[in-house]
Image: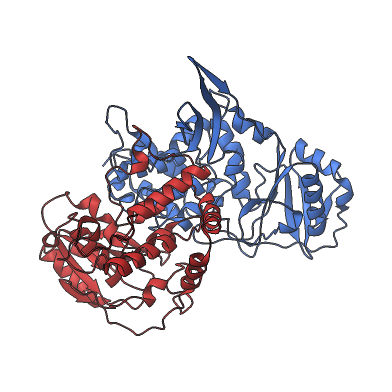
């Protein structure tokens, strides 16, 4: 198979064509945020940048979206479907910890109920991933079977070369089709451009299997009494997370006889999240809610969907107002698991 | 720093406090809140320029959690929140063991070293590096260079705007809101057991992150903070979407000060502005 490289300028030309073809092009900007680009020049690709403060999940699973609108019509109620933007979504420059999130959350959106809203966007998308040359004390992708070069979730993968060039890897048939379609912008790789390697390997922090086994056996462990006690119960962690996918369904009135039903982001750290209509709340304190967050990510999702609900991007920890660090919590569990698996 | 540890250790040994809400450093040298319950725990207690959190936010969770005083390490700015909570009858002075620290300024960006460029604006207006009252006092005060008030310029610019321009400015800012409620959760003055956004019968405020929902939430929070904000700037620091929330609360505080000569959290005996009426209050806004 032919190997290709592409220049940053040509990537921007591709972005331009996509925009002209009414695609929604999402890329990172000079502010290091994922943004729906208005023009290709806004695109900035920096493999050495810290992961953006928010993930790109909002482009597949928006923070709020209408399910339907209603309007009272005498004694009847008329329902209206929202107009859906069916444009193709192209993400350019996703880090491996971003790209990997989509196949992970796709499982929950296609488990019993098929979520058309998510699927219509995900099925009609193309993810161009890029190797990551960043690492800090919050990163732990390689503890979860991934790596800064992992192509999970990407259709096309870029590896940085010298002089603003990228080596192009076609990962999926969708990716191959894309490279074929924009062939004129890709050049044959003659091996002239030096590849830019990561400076250092990421350290390994914990053994996931040990962590999982501990979680399987220690729902009542006293570790949970203090693990999340400083958590303030906001949803910063969940809302910037690429894999947190919980939502709430609400009816909202607009005027006296009309309104909409909407699907909004929700988070397990909110006290209302599990509050029953009776007033009973099975997770009645922050410690229990924090245990839920860790258990859902590292145990329940694995039990049900054979995936860890975390890509190790570290966003939740970087942004936490009280510096709760998910990696340090999992490391503590890892060290606890070395001692015993029994319930204390 | 040893002095602070010593004070906390003694307080826990002699049961002057049943636990102390304080700061510790984690293994990555990140300063974060924690609860010291034993004299051994107190060994971890530290205070530095990275001690940004206003620890008074933890009172509601612990106030009815057992016998004995709650210990807390406070900077001068955080003490205003403690005072305000006492003024608003949320907690009693006698239930607290206050360990004041002489503060030499805290950082704006916790990922960077303390410097003149990386100092919170509130430090510029801090009137007391030493908390005005306490049960014990620790740390030596160091002089530091005052930061520039880069917010004042923006505030002046907004004041000059027409109401349409202002609406445009705030609409663009609030559009970013994702309703994570980090602003509410880090705020020591946001202690309602049930926030108005959680009241669903009827639903007063749209919970959706739509233009309307975001505007309603941010404006109602600003109103509820009118004359109550003590200026710790935690809301703005916590906001993952970088909304300049303290522009609103700070402006409201300035209005409370200029119109009523009142600043919240400054006196244990003065009744809170929002709960009092004075015959000298201006009435010219009633038209």
Q: Residue furthest bottom?
A: B143
Quadrant in which residue B282 is drawn: bottom left
Left or right of B83? Residue A210 is right
Whether residue B43 can be seen here: no
Residue A311: give x, y in percent of width and height.
54, 46
Q: Residue furthest front?
A: B287
Whether residue B2 can be seen here: yes
Count of labels shown?
Answer: 0
**Tell me, what colour scheme is on the image?**
by chain
Q: Residue furthest top?
A: A75
Q: Is residue A200 above or below residue B128?
A: above
In-front residue for pair A344/A326: A326
Q: Is residue B114 above or below residue A141?
A: below
Residue A267: give x, y in percent of width and height.
43, 41
In-front residue for pair A232/A224: A232
Please identify the quadrant where the N terminus of chain A is shown. top right
Left or right of A309? Residue A150 is right
Colour displayed for chain A in the image of the structure: blue
Quadrant in which residue B10 is drawn: bottom left
Residue A256: give x, y in percent of width and height.
45, 29
In-front residue for pair A288/A263: A263
Residue B7: give x, y in percent of width and height.
18, 72
- Chain whose colour in the figure is red: B
Q: Is residue A321 above or below residue A76?
A: below
Please identify the quadrant where the C terminus of chain A is shown. top left
Left or right of A270? Residue B87 is left
């Amino acid at each position: 198979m032919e190997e290709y490289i592409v220049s940053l300028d040509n990537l921007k030309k591709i972005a331009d064509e996509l925009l002209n073809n009414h695609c929604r092009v999402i890329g990172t900007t000079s502010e290091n945020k994922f943004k729906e680009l208005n023009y290709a020049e806004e695109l900035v690709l920096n493999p050495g940048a810290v992961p953006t403060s928010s993930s790109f999940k909002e482009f597949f699973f928006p923070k709020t979206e209408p399910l339907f609108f209603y309007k009272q019509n005498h004694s009847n109620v008329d329902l209206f479907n929202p107009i859906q933007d069916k444009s193709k979504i192209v993400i350019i420059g996703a880090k491996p910890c971003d790209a990997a999130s989509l196949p992970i959350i796709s499982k929950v959106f296609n488990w019993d109920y098929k979520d058309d809203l998510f699927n219509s966007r995900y099925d009609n998308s193309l993810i161009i991933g890029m190797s990551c040359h960043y690492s800090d004390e919050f990163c732990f992708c390689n503890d979860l079977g991934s790596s800064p070069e992992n192509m999970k979730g990407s259709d096309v993968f870029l590896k940085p070369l010298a002089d603003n060039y990228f080596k192009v890897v076609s990962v999926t048939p969708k990716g191959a089709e894309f490279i074929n379609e924009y062939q004129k912008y890709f050049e044959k790789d003659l091996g002239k451009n030096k590849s830019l390697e990561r400076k250092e390997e990421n350290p390994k922090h914990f053994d996931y299997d040990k962590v999982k086994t501990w979680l399987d056996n220690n729902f009542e462990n006293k570790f949970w009494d203090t693990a999340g006690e400083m958590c303030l119960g906001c949803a910063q962690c969940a809302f910037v997370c690429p894999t947190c996918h919980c939502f709430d369904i609400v009816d909202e009135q607009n005027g006296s006889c009309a309104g909409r039903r909407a699907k909004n982001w929700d988070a397990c750290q909110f006290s209302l999240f599990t509050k029953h209509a009776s007033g009973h709340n099975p997770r009645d304190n922050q410690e229990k809610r924090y245990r839920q967050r860790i258990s859902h990510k590292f145990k329940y999702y694995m039990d049900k969907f054979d995936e860890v609900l975390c890509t190790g991007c570290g966003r939740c920890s970087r942004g936490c107002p009280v510096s709760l660090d998910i990696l340090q919590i999992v490391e503590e569990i890892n060290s606890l698991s070395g001692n015993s698996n029994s319930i204390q | 720093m040893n002095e602070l540890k010593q004070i906390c250790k003694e307080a826990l040994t002699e049961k002057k406090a049943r636990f102390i809400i304080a700061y510790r450093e984690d293994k990555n040298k990140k300063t974060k809140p924690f609860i010291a319950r034993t004299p051994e725990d107190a060994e971890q207690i530290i205070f530095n320029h990275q001690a940004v959190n206003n620890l008074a936010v933890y009172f509601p969770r612990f106030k009815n959690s057992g016998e004995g005083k709650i210990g807390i390490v406070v900077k001068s700015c955080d003490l205003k929140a403690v005072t305000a909570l006492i003024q608003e009858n949320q907690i009693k002075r006698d239930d607290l063991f206050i360990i004041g620290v002489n503060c030499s300024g805290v950082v704006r960006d916790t990922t960077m070293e303390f410097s003149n460029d990386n100092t919170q604006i509130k430090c510029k207006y801090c009137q007391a590096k030493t908390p005005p009252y306490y049960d014990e006092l620790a740390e030596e005060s160091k002089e530091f260079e005052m930061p520039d008030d880069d917010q004042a310029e923006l505030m002046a610019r907004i004041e000059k705007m027409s109401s349409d321009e202002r609406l445009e400015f705030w609409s663009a800012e609030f559009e970013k809101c994702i309703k994570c409620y980090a602003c509410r959760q880090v705020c020591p003055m946001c202690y309602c057991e049930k926030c108005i956004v959680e009241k669903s019968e009827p639903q007063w405020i749209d919970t959706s992150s739509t233009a309307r929902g975001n505007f309603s939430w941010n404006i109602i929070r600003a109103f509820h903070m009118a004359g109550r904000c003590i200026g710790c700037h935690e809301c703005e620091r916590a906001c993952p979407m970088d909304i300049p929330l303290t522009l609103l609360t700070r402006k409201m505080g300035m209005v409370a000060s200029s119109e009523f000569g009142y600043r919240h959290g400054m006196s244990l005996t003065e009744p809170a502005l929002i709960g009092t009426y004075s015959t000298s209050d201006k009435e010219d806004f009633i038209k």
